[in-house]
Image (spheres, grey):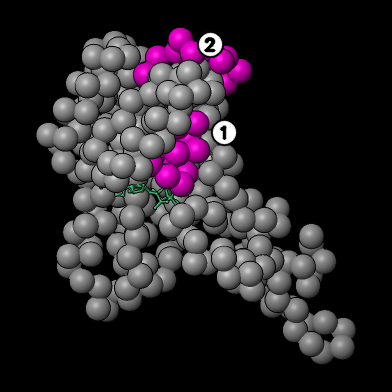
Amino acid sequence: MSNETNNNEGPLAVITGAARGIGAAIAQRLSDAGYAVAIWDYNEEGAAETAAALVAAGRRAVSAKVDVADEKMVEAATQAAVAKFGTPALLVNNAGIRHREPLETLKRSSWDREIATNLTGPMVCTQVMGRLMLAAGKGSIVNIASMSGSYGQAMRGAYTPTKAGIIGLTSLTAVEWGGRGIRCNAISPGMISTPAHVEAYSNEALKTAREAMIPLGRIGDGNDIADVVVFLASDAARYINGANIPVDGGVTKALLALMPVPTANGEIETTLSQLGLR
Ligand SMILES: NC(=O)c1ccc[n+]([C@@H]2O[C@H](COP(=O)([O-])OP(=O)(O)OC[C@H]3O[C@@H](n4cnc5c(N)ncnc54)[C@H](O)[C@@H]3O)[C@@H](O)[C@H]2O)c1
């Protein structure tokens, strides 16, 4: 698929957690690029609304209530989507959750739920969809990881381990299936404004403080991620396999720039803007 086509005749792309946020933006951009999209989410109503908006615009879309860690639901939704739009060319493992808990009191139930959604779910969807792609001899999988998968994010429960895990799953899939026509890559978003972060980004002071840490100077949005998904799924990315691409405005490269430094008058400067870097 080229990311410039808009012929509405492209193959099936399945996007998990696509009722809202980054997943909904990915579904919209893939639909713009000509894919038929299957919008999966355990929020049944939200998934149906996202799909209905696309269908109302003349696009091909279907929705399903799916818990990504439930193999039976994944199998059933796959059969329904394939019956409508044929073999999937693309799977985007986007559904993800996070809890705010410190490690020493992290509840086993929170750990299990996050592992199930963020890691077992992508594995189940990869297996179910991957078997169809392997039979077809082609396909592409994009896993939505996080910068938290490479850098410890304090007080976030199992989030960092699960996102490190999906980066590992990406490497495994790329190596096992690359020779059989299937590429698998990950995207590690930085700070992205979505419904999951309403609290943070409706707080102007917090938003401004976070923006001050990002070399590109702004919080990202869903389309910043969706455009990279379209690229990774396209033939333009034909030699990219097993990559984990940071899409974070450079924030994970800013550590040394954020190192406090003394000024000539003895004060201490701490942020990119104070340092005059943007
Ligand atoms: N927003 C960010 O700053 C950010 C940063 C890095 C990574 N990410 C990752 O991007 C992805 C999307 O995040 P978002 O901010 O859009 O979140 P969001 O909460 O706005 O959307 C996530 C969607 O996933 C669905 N979902 C959750 N568990 C599910 C399950 N078990 N089965 C099916 N659907 C399920 C939710 O109902 C929701 O619609 C997640 O994997 C998240 O970890 C987000």
Q: In which quarter of the image is residue 196?
A: bottom left
Q: Quadrant of residue 47?
A: top left
Return the residue at label 2.
Answer: 7
Q: What stretch is highlighted in magenta?
A: 1-28
Q: Which residue is drawn at the image coordinates 33% and 25% (left, top)? A: 62
Q: Is residue 158 left or right of residue 271?
A: left
Q: Which residue is drawn at the image coordinates 67% and 56% (left, top)? A: 218
30 versus 262 height, above or below? above
Near-viewer residue (6 or 109): 6
User: Does label 2 or label 1 sit earlier along the sequence?
Assistant: 2
Q: In this view, which residue lies farthest toward the bottom?
A: 266
Residue 18 lies in the magenta-colored region:
yes
Whole-percent x and y of residue 247? 56, 45
Q: Which residue is drawn at the image coordinates 52% and 67% (left, top)? A: 200
Describe the element under mark 1 as helix, strand or loop: helix
Amino acid type at circle 1 is Asp
Return the residue at label 1.
Answer: 227
Whole-percent x and y of residue 28? 50, 31
Q: Distance between the residues labelled 2 and 1?
A: 18 Å
Asked whether mark 2 and ligand 1 are closer than 8 Å, the reply comes as no
148 versus 61 height, above or below? below
Q: How many residues crowd mark 2 within 10 Å: few (<14), some (14–19), many (20+)? A: few
Q: How many residues crowd mark 1 within 10 Å: few (<14), some (14–19), many (20+)? A: some
Can residue 7 be seen by looking at this rendering?
A: yes
